[in-house]
Amino acid sequence: MSSLADRVSEARPVETPRTHRWGFGAFVLVFAVFLLSAVLIGAIAQLESPGAGISVPVALIGSIIPPVLAAGVALLVTVLRGNGPRIDLRWSWSWVDVRVGLRFGLIGLVCTTAAAFLWTKIVGERNASSALGQLVDNQRLPLIAAITMFLFIWLIGPICEEIIYRGLLWGALERLNWGRWIVFGLTTVIFAVSHLEPMRTVLLLVIAIPIGLARLVTGRLGASIVAHQINNFLPALAVLLIALDVMPA
């Protein structure tokens, strides 16, 4: 049987020089789009219902639109200032990407589950929950809303985040010629910090490491997307079951 090092060597592609004209400023622009759209949605919701709690439709829109919009801007940047996402973000699919993504995704799922259990014991269940998890704890969601949230957390959200962090940000840092491991470390830290959930930053670091390793090993975005989706499946399923009142919060 081949060793892990041999399989990693087989999965790693030959790196070719990037020729895109965008850099770290593109990531700053995309992150600004994410933040401003989230703030705008929140402000509109407050104007329409001042003093009221966050409704389910507003929570869904506020959770889904900002990352989708930011990822769309990231893709547009690669088209206008580069060679498109396939070349600039190394966004291609192969069975190698799927296999490596599954492997690191399952490793990440085990590590994340253990880390989440320990972190909950340290900071408390409320502080360890994500913003979406806290929404589900507060109210029972309609079936369509619960399914929408499940699909977003499991499939769509990881694609958007990988485009932004292991795609655009990774490519911007690679352009500085700082080395693959430095790029891996910086994208991992920025991914965790940029979620703006201080009590969950350590947990997000644990989540990000195997996902980043999938990107590092293959040199392609497809593997990190698969790893991220695998890692998000159980949390997404838990949110769905809690929202439907099948499982206790």
Image (cartoon, rainbow, N blue to C red):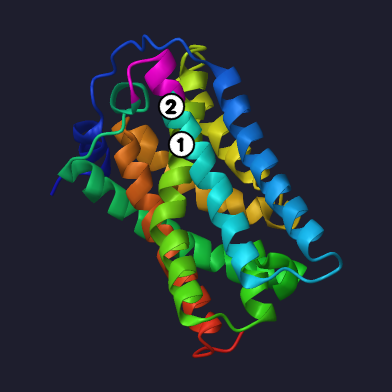
* Image location of residue 101, percent across then percent down: 31, 49
Q: Nearer the viewer, residue 27 or 193?
A: 27
Residue found farthest to the left: 1
- Residue 194 seen in the current view: no
Q: With 110 as the anchor, is 41 left or right in this view?
A: right
Q: Is residue 98 magenta?
A: no
- Residue 235 seen in the current view: yes
Q: With 111 as the anchor, is 82 left or right in this view?
A: left
Q: Mark 1 falls on what kind of element?
A: helix
Query: Residue 72 got which mark?
Result: 1
The residue under label 1 is which amino acid type? Gly
Q: Nearer the viewer, residue 202 or 50?
A: 50
Give the residues in magenta: 77-84
Q: Mark 2 falls on what kind of element?
A: helix
Asked if the residues shown at circle 1 and circle 2 are in contact, with their CB atoms under 8 angstroms apart, the answer is yes
Up-down relation of residue 104 to residue 91 (above or below)? below
* Image location of residue 118, percent across then percent down: 64, 68
Residue of label 2: 76
